[in-house]
Amino acid sequence: MANVAVADQFNVAGQLAAGNAAYSRGDYAEAFRLYKNIAVLGVPEAHYRLGLMYAGGLGTRQSANQAEFWMNSAAQSNYPGAAQALSLIRAMMAKG
C-alpha cells in the first residue's frame, strides 16, 4: 500500500480503516505502521491493535513489554476487550 499522503497524516479514521484493511489482507508491516501513526495521537483502538501485534509478533518483533504497554493504554480508555487481553498478556509474562 502506498504511504499515506502528508495531507492525510492526521486523518485518524482513514488511517485506522487502512490499517484494518492491511491487517485483514495479511500486510502486518503496513498495518503496524498505520496503527503506530495514530496510536501516538491517543487512539484507543490503535493502542489495542498494537498490543495484539506486539504480543503475536505481527509486523514487528514480538515484545511482551510493548504488548503490555499498548494494551494497558487501551484498557485505561476502556476499549472493549482490552482489560481481558491485558490480563492474558500479563499471565504470559509471568510464565516467562
Image (tube, rainbow, N blue to C red):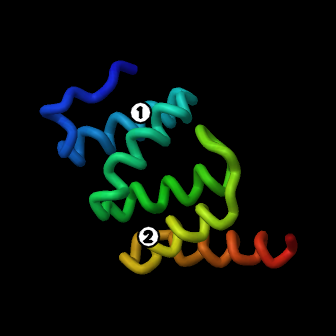
Tell me residue 48's x, y (percent).
48, 61
Q: Residues within 10 Å of mark 1 (few under 14, many from 20)?
A: some
Quadrant of res 42: bottom left
Name the residue rendered at 69%, 63% in the picture. Answer: 64
Dot 1 corresponds to which residue? 21
Name the residue rendered at 66%, 57% in the picture. Answer: 55
- Reply above or below: 73 against 35: below
Q: Which mark is residue 74?
A: 2
Name the residue rendered at 65%, 78% in the picture. Answer: 87
Q: Amino acid at mark 2?
A: Ala
Q: Amino acid at mark 1?
A: Ala
Q: Residues within 10 Å of mark 2 (few under 14, many from 20)?
A: many
Name the residue nearer the viewer: 61 or 95.
61
Position of 1 compared to 5: left or right? right
Quadrant of res 15: top left
Tell me residue 18's x, y (percent).
34, 34
Name the residue nearer the viewer: 61 or 74.
61
Position of 42 compared to 75: left or right? left
Tell me residue 76's x, y (percent).
42, 80
- Reply above or below: 94 against 33: below
Q: Residue furthest left?
A: 7
Q: Nearer the viewer, mark 2 or mark 1?
A: 2
